Amino acid sequence: MAKFDGKHLRGLLGPFIFKKTKKGSVVSTKAEKVRQTEETKKSASFFGGVASFARVLRTMMKPVGVQDTGLMNRLNKELLSVLLQCYNKPTKTFNFTNTHFKRLEGMDLNSNSLLKENLWDLPGYSKNEDQLIISVPNITPGKNLSFPNDALFCELYIQPIQIDLNGGYFKKMDAIRIEISFFDEVVSAQEFNVELFPGTLCIVAVGLNYFKKNVDRYIDLNNLDFSPAAFAYAAMHDGVFAEVVHERVTTELEEGSSVTNTVFWSKEHQGFPIQQLPVQ
């Protein structure tokens, strides 16, 4: 109910809301309650699952580089497109036996400083059975790797992540770090093997972390305006996920039993139920 203070009305009167501000009285209409249809609720739930998945990816890739504020929308948009292509609406399940996730490859984590404009010869990727081979070419500072002003040291940071999309389990693999000095003539080509687990999505991000030296310590130069990093590889690995996600061990001691729980795959998402193919 609205009240009159002698000069102004305040509060609710019918469909109108009266407010007093520094600029005077303001009248607005009461918001109507919007009824959501079942289809609208399902769409909202679908988008919420995609946004939640994207948030986990952004969090796990934070060490790779400083992410700009627009990455959330860019990643949400691309993942929504990918997952809609994989979605079977009648069965409410997903079919990931495709290469749709390649849409992520080349997406910069920071649009203010593109990776390909600072590292001209990017790592290559190939598969050999259950191994992903990451091939880093020769790197020549100042030639195919840029160094911003004051930077004397660069760390090429490669982060692989593997995901059980069905169960929402994530495994952050060991990061690959290559140290490069501004004074190096050339850093020789190197190859790294990453174990691939059947039935998982593997995503790799690559970033450049720069430092300058101040007396006897190095200072990080990466910031919101300059932090070259990008998603570089994204693909499903064939098979059915059947890994032990955690292990619970009970040890009997004199003072009582001790229970430890080792987590191999962390539960980070509700998951996207995979379509069960008929047995041949």
Image (cartoon, helix red, strand yellow):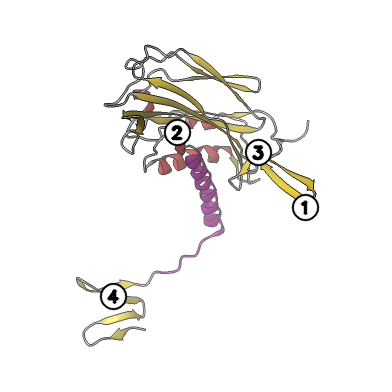
SS at mark 3 in the image: loop
Disc 3 to disc 1, C-alpha distance: 28 Å
Extreme-left residue of the structure: 23
Residue found 39% across the figure and 69% down from its top: 31
Q: Return the x and y of residue 16 as percentages of the image width and height.
A: 33, 76
Q: Which residues are magenta?
A: 32-60
Q: Is residue 47 magenta?
A: yes
Q: Return the x and y of residue 29 as percentages of the image width and height.
A: 33, 72
Residue found 49% across the figure and 65% down from its top: 35
Specify which label sits upstream in the sequence, 4 or 3.
4
Q: Nearer the viewer, mark 3 or mark 1?
A: 1
| Label annotation for residue 64 | 2
SS at mark 4 in the image: strand
Q: Amino acid at mark 2?
A: Val
In this rendering, the answer to whether 217 lies above or below 49 is above
Name the image quarter holding residue 174.
top right
Q: Nearer the viewer, mark 1 or mark 2?
A: 1
Extreme-front residue of the structure: 254
Which quarter of the rendered picture does the N terminus lie within? Answer: bottom left
Q: Return the x and y of residue 192 as percentages of the image width and height.
A: 55, 20
Residue found 69% across the figure and 30% down from its top: 239
In this rendering, the answer to whether 60 lies above or below 3 is above
Looking at the picture, tell me which residue is in the foreground, 47 or 14.
Answer: 47
Q: Main secondary structure of the magenta part?
A: helix
In this picture, residue 147 sits left or right of residue 244: left
- According to the picture, the residue beneath numbered tag 1 turns out to be 255
